[in-house]
Structures are given as C-alpha cells and as structure tokens.
C-alpha cells in the first residue's frame, strides 16, 4: 500500500494535490509513499510558529516544557511498533531502527531530565555568576538567556528520520521555540508517523510543531533574526542555505551538522594480542556495517601503526566476511540496504573515486548477493574495505565521504603522524583512539581535539560500558569544526541555549535580583518575625533573611572541638606554629567549627517544613577567627527550585558569617529540601 504523506501546517494536516514525488522502498523498489508540499503557505507557517507556537511555549516554564517533552517520549515509546513497521522499507535492520526510534525517544527523556535537574523552573536562565562593576556594589552585571521569539526550522538528513528529528526537537521545545520540521524526503514516512504520534498525544500547545514533507518552497525568504535554522546533511546543501541572502541579511542563527571524514586510531602500544587491538577491529567492522555505514560519525579512515597494518587488515576482513547483507526483515541479515538507489549510486561513485588512490581489499563495489531480496531492485552494497599504503600522497580519502559501509585502512609512522592524518579531515565529528597508555591518549587530545567535536578513548577498562565510536549522546555535544559544519547540538542543557538569546544585563542588585528570581549580593534582605525554617517552600520569598545574634568563639570551644573531632591541626592548637604561618595571627577556630556554630545560630530546631540539609556549595573561609571573635550569621533565601511538585523543593540559602567588625569570615550556599 502506498502512503500519502501529509504536512502538518497551522495545526491542520494538509495533503498536497500536485507536485508529488515518490518515496521508494530501499529493499524492493516499490513505491512506499507519495509526498509533496504544493499549496503550503510557508510564510504563514512561520508566522504561526512565531505568533502562536512560540508564544504558547513561552507561557510555560522550562520544567513544564521539559515535562511535556518527557510525555512526548513516552507517547513515542508506547506506539514504537508503528514506527518499526515503517522502518524496514528504509533499509534499516531492527538494530538500526532501535538506534533511530528508541534512541530518539531516549534522547528526549535525557534532555527532559537534565533540564529539570539543572535548570530553574523559570523562563529566564542566568549564565554564570553576577559581575561586580561599581565599587560600592550598587551597579552589577549578570548574563541571562531568554527564549528567541521566532521559529526553529529543522532540516534533517535521511539516515535517522526519527532520532535526527528528536535530537533537535527536544532542546528546541524546552528552549521555548516552536519548530517547523523538514525531514529528508527519503524516509519521511517515518518522521511523519512520529510527528503524528506527538500531535495525537495532545501534549503540545497549538503551533508548537509543524511538518513539511517535501521541498521548502519560499520558506527561507521569510526568515527573521529571531529564527534558527538547524541543518543536518551535506556540506553542499549547507553552503547553499547558509548563503541564502535572507539568512545573511538577518543574521539568522544557523547550526550546521554536515559531512565528516571521521578517523579511528589504533594506538602504537596496542599491537596484536592486546585487548585494545581486538576492540579496535570489532569497532571498525561494527561502525562500517551499522545502518549500512550511513552514520555521520562512522569510521571512514582507519589509522594503524605501519607494523600492524597487515594484522589489522586480516582481522577486519575476517569480521566483514561474517556480515550478511539483505532484506532487513529476513532472518539472519546483519546489514540492510542503503536508504535509496540514489544513495547506492552515490556510494558506488565515491567508492570508485577512492579506488583511484587505494586498493580494495574487501568487498565488491558493483555486486552483492542480498539474502531475501533481489539485488537489482534494492539499494544493496557489500562492505568495502580499502587499503592505502601512502596516505600522504592521497587526497580523495581525506576529502570524499562515501556515505555507506566504506572505510580506508592506512598506516601511520608515529603519534604525530597519526594526529596529522586525522586532522586532514579538516574538522570531524568523532575520533576514536584505542590505547591503554594515558600519556599517548593525552598527546592525541593535545594534537587532535581542536579538529574534532568528540573524542572517544577506548581501552580494556571502559570497553564493556563504552557506547562506542559512533554514538552521539544527548548529554555530550554532537558537532564538529570545519568540514563537519561548525555546529554543536545536544550537549545536555547547552543544546537548549541554541534556541535562546544571551544578553548582558546591567543594573542595581535589587532590579536584577527581581528579574532573575535569585537573590544577588546588594539586593534587599527583608526580615520578619517568622523564622524562615517555619515557612514552607511556597511561603519563602527570595531575599527573606534571618539575622542572628552573635556568638563569641572561646579558646575552650576550639580545644573542645579539636579533641571531640580529632582535628588537632597545629593552626588550631599550637600558638607559635600558627603564628609562623602567613595566613594566621596565631591559633584560630576550625573552619568546620565556624560552620557548626553558624548552624547553631540559624537553625530553628522544632520539626517543620525543612526536611533535610543536603549540602553546601561555594564555601569560602575569608578571614581567620581567633578566640574572642564574635560571629553572627545572615541566612538569605537565594533561589528556589521545585523538585517534586506537591511534595518538596530545593531552597538555596546564601549564608554570610561576619565578625564583630562586620567583616566577612565565611560565605557559602546552603541547600535544603523544604516541604511545599
Ligand atoms: P542533503 O542532500 O544535503 O539533504 C539534507 C537535507 O536538506 C534533506 O532534508 C534535504 O531535503 C534538504 N535539502 C536539500 N536541498 C535543500 C534546499 N535547497 N532547501 C532546503 N532543504 C534542502 O544531504 P543528504 O545527501 O540527504 O545527506 C547525506 C549527508 O548528510 C552526508 O554527507 C552526511 O555526512 C550528512 N550527515 C551529517 C550528519 C551530522 O550529524 N553531521 C548526520 C547525517 C548525515 P530532501 O531530502 O527533500 O532533498
């Protein structure tokens, strides 16, 4: 049955009546779906995203948006089999589809949970600490992020129709920006089905998500400075879109993930017989064949110490010989088809280019016998391993990305040579190094990190838990410099900030505190008759302060504390030795004694809304406190974050301990969990 794909524009499903193109099965050449965008009003879609979708999302807090994204992931997991059913025709095996579908949902889950744990339940984010500017502290600076007020246009590659969409969508929605998603036409049936699941979940506010299945018409003509384009695909398309006159004129933010000639390096210490050697061989073969090598991060260049080249070649060949190419639905098939016949021609052309420099040592560019399918009808190709003995004389292998199960084996002379060869990719997404020698690993980082977005160091200690060379993870950045596009996606909450604007604020502590919902030094510290420990999470106001009575530290206190805890360090016990130390006037109180006394001063002991003290942050002892010092404490509500709605939230308290002269002895942030 041929599916008719629909666009989702301005909260309506829309089927184009003309200008349709066919989506062909990668396995048997049948028409799987028809799609087109004739009749879509692209300018109106952008307006809808900005004026309705993004406006709705900005009414929600970051935690509300993150919870929504978690709900979307749950909805996809509930209906995942619908997606698996569509995935086979893209040439993907069940394992490949797992990366795409469940990997995609997993990315949403992780993004959601990181946002709720690491970002405030607010709509403004602070970036770093406040900056003191005026001498008297009445004029300060603070960097903040607020959501862009435009639309996010996502243009995705064909290889992971679900994951490729969701890894961009999670951060975008949490960032408060509505998305217009344009999947690659090949595989769009999967993206369309996934969008349908998300829309039908009823979790998204109006306008938050739209879908274009086909060409984007005049969309780019209507972009503004508030919009973001996130692109994954070829360098040629990226260059075309980046140089669109409107993108240039409006300085439209453009995040690009494009071609990459990733390398994997066997360390000079990792010869045959070592665990790292076996791990390397396994990983190269796996990366070549997973998703038939159509991974932006796959290993295209395999760099090996010259002395081990023959051994590596034989070992990889032995593994590749076990690969069964065929219909991904057929029993026993371990590698499916490329995504389309167009891809097949492209990979064959590029393999022939590589063959002008390198020798093909495994596979056949033109023939393969797929299991359970007809070779002539599907986009099948065998794994192709090339060998190039003089990598410095070559150009094509460092420049041409054959987006399929293709890798070239090359020798290197020493670590510096390997680094220089890896860097000839001129900017890559991923590099892996297999070594058990941390000193060698560090040399690779110093030499190659500047050219790579992510570097995986694999050895016997981490191999079992390693996620491998080619898997981008939601908590780590995905992207790379130069040829790889210069973009950065995901990376935990970093990815969310691509959809927000950073602004530097300057003003009084009172004003800036109120804006960022966080007490900043110099802002008012109102106090009242009620002890803050008697107030619930909801009742505590930012800035509310308890000023305690003083307590004088005596020599007996210091002695008692020393013997009680066992901390008889000379600075507390030996007057002469302490005085000889440049930091102390003589014996001084323990820092921990000061903390303990501070708690004794500010705590209100009866059971109440404070459930637990779970830590201190940013602790500094600024002035020594010899016996006779009278300390007192200001305990100020600095910020609040709901942790379990209806139950408890985290309160961060700014604690300042001062002496009888008003000078600061210690400062820290105290964290408590408070009942709502
Ligand atoms: P492509 O031709 O550049 O297509 C990528 C996307 O751009 C598709 O959605 C395509 O839509 C769209 N597109 C093409 N021309 C456009 C235009 N004029 N205006 C708006 N959109 C346009 O790339 P591909 O050949 O499909 O993908 C393979 C490449 O992607 C490889 O080179 C690979 O390295 C790269 N890739 C990179 C990453 C990464 O994360 N860095 C991941 C995967 C793939 P249509 O399909 O409708 O043409």
Image (cartoon, rainbow, N blue to C red):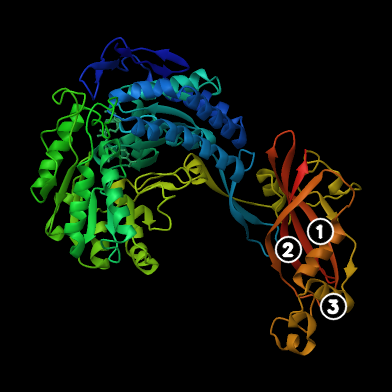
Q: Position of residue 88 (x, y in %)?
A: 31, 24
Mark 2, other Cα within 10 Å: few <14 / some 14–19 / many ≥20: many
Which badge, 1 or 2, is on the more N-terminal residue?
1
Tell which circle, 1 or 3, labels the residue nearer the N-terminal end: 3
Residue located 35% across and 21% down the image:
86
Q: Which residue is mark 2?
A: 667
- Residue 367 in the image, given as x and y percentages of width and height: 11, 33
Q: Is residue 164 visible?
A: no
Q: Secondary structure at mark 3?
A: helix
Disc assigned to residue 465? none
- The local crowd at label 1, few if under 14, some if 14 to 19, many if 20 or more residues have their Cα within 10 Å, is many
| Residue that badge 1 annotates | 634
**Helix, strand or loop for disc 2:** strand
Q: Position of residue 162 (x, y in %)?
A: 39, 30
The residue mark sitting in front, 1 or 3, is 3
Q: Looking at the rendering, which quadrant does residue 328 occupy?
A: top left
- Alpha-carbon span between mark 1 and mark 3: 26 Å
Ligand 1, what quadrant? top left
Quarter of the image that includes the N terminus:
top left
Residue 257 seen in this snapshot = yes
- Foreground residue, 34 or 205? 34
Between 338 and 175, the one lying in front of the other is 338
């Amino acid at each position: 049955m041929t599916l008719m794909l629909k666009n989702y524009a301005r909260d309506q499903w829309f089927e184009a009546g003309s200008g349709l193109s066919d989506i062909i099965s990668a396995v048997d050449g049948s028409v799987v779906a028809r799609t087109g965008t004739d009749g879509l009003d692209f300018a109106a879609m952008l307006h809808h995203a900005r004026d309705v979708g993004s406006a709705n999302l900005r009414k929600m807090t970051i935690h509300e948006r993150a919870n929504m994204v978690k709900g979307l992931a749950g909805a996809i997991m509930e209906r995942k089999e619908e997606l698996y059913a569509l995935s086979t025709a893209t040439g993907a095996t069940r394992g490949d589809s797992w990366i795409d579908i469940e990997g995609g949902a997993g990315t949403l889950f992780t993004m959601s949970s990181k946002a709720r744990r690491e970002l405030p339940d607010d709509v403004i984010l602070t970036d770093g600490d406040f900056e003191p500017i005026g001498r008297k502290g009445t004029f300060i600076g603070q960097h903040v992020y607020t959501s862009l007020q435009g639309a996010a246009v996502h243009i995705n590659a064909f290889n992971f129709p679900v994951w490729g969409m969701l890894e961009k969508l999670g951060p975008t929605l949490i960032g408060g920006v509505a998305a217009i998603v344009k999947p690659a036409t090949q595989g769009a049936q999967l993206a369309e089905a996934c969008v349908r699941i998300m829309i039908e979940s009823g979790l998204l506010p109006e306008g938050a998500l739209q879908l274009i299945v086909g060409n984007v018409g005049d969309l780019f003509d209507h972009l503004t400075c508030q919009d973001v384009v996130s692109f994954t695909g070829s360098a040629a398309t990226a260059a075309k879109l980046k140089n669109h006159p409107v993108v240039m004129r409006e300085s439209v933010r453009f995040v690009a993930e494009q071609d990459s000639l990733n390398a994997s390096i066997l360390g000079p210490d990792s010869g045959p017989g070592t665990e790292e050697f076996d791990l390397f061989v396994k990983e190269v073969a796996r990366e070549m064949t997973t998703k038939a090598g159509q991974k932006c991060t796959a290993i295209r260049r395999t760099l090996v110490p010259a002395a081990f080249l023959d051994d590596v070649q034989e070992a990889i060949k032995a593994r590749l010989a076990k690969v069964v190419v065929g219909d991904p639905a057929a029993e026993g098939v371990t590698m499916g088809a490329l995504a389309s016949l167009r891809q097949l021609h492209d990979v064959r052309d590029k393999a022939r280019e590589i063959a002008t420099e390198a020798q093909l040592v495994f596979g056949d560019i033109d023939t393969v016998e797929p299991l359970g399918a007809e070779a002539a009808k599907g986009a099948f190709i065998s794994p192709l391993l090339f060998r190039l003995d003089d990598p410095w004389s070559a150009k094509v292998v460092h420049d041409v990305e054959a987006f399929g199960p293709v890798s070239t084996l090359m020798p290197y002379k020493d670590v510096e040579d390997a680094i220089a060869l890896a860097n000839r990719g001129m900017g890559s997404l991923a590099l892996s190094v297999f070594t058990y020698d941390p000193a060698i690993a560090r040399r690779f980082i110093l030499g190659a990190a500047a050219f790579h977005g992510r570097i995986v160091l694999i050895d016997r200690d981490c191999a079992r838990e390693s996620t491998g060379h080619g898997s981008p993870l939601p908590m780590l950045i995905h992207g790379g410099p130069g040829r790889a596009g210069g973009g950065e996606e995901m990376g935990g909450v970093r990815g969310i900030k691509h959809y927000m604007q950073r602004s530097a604020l300057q003003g009084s502590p009172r004003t800036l505190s109120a804006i960022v919902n966080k007490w900043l030094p110099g802002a008012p510290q109102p106090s009242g008759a009620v002890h803050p420990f008697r107030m619930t999470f909801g009742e505590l106001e930012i800035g509310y302060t308890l000023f305690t009575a003083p307590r004088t530290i005596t020599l007996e206190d210091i002695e008692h504390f020393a013997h009680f805890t066992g901390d008889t360090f000379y600075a507390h016990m030996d007057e002469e030795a302490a005085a000889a130390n440049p930091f102390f006037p003589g014996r001084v109180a323990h820092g921990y004694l000061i903390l303990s006394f501070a708690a004794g001063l500010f705590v209100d002991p009866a059971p109440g809304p404070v459930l637990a003290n779970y830590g201190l942050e940013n602790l500094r002892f600024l002035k020594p406190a010899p016996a006779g010092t009278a300390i007192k404490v200001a305990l100020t509500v600095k910020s609040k974050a709901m942790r379990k709605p209806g139950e408890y939230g985290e309160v961060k308290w700014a604690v300042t301990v001062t002496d009888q002269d008003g000078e600061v002895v210690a400062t820290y942030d105290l964290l408590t969990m408070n009942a709502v």
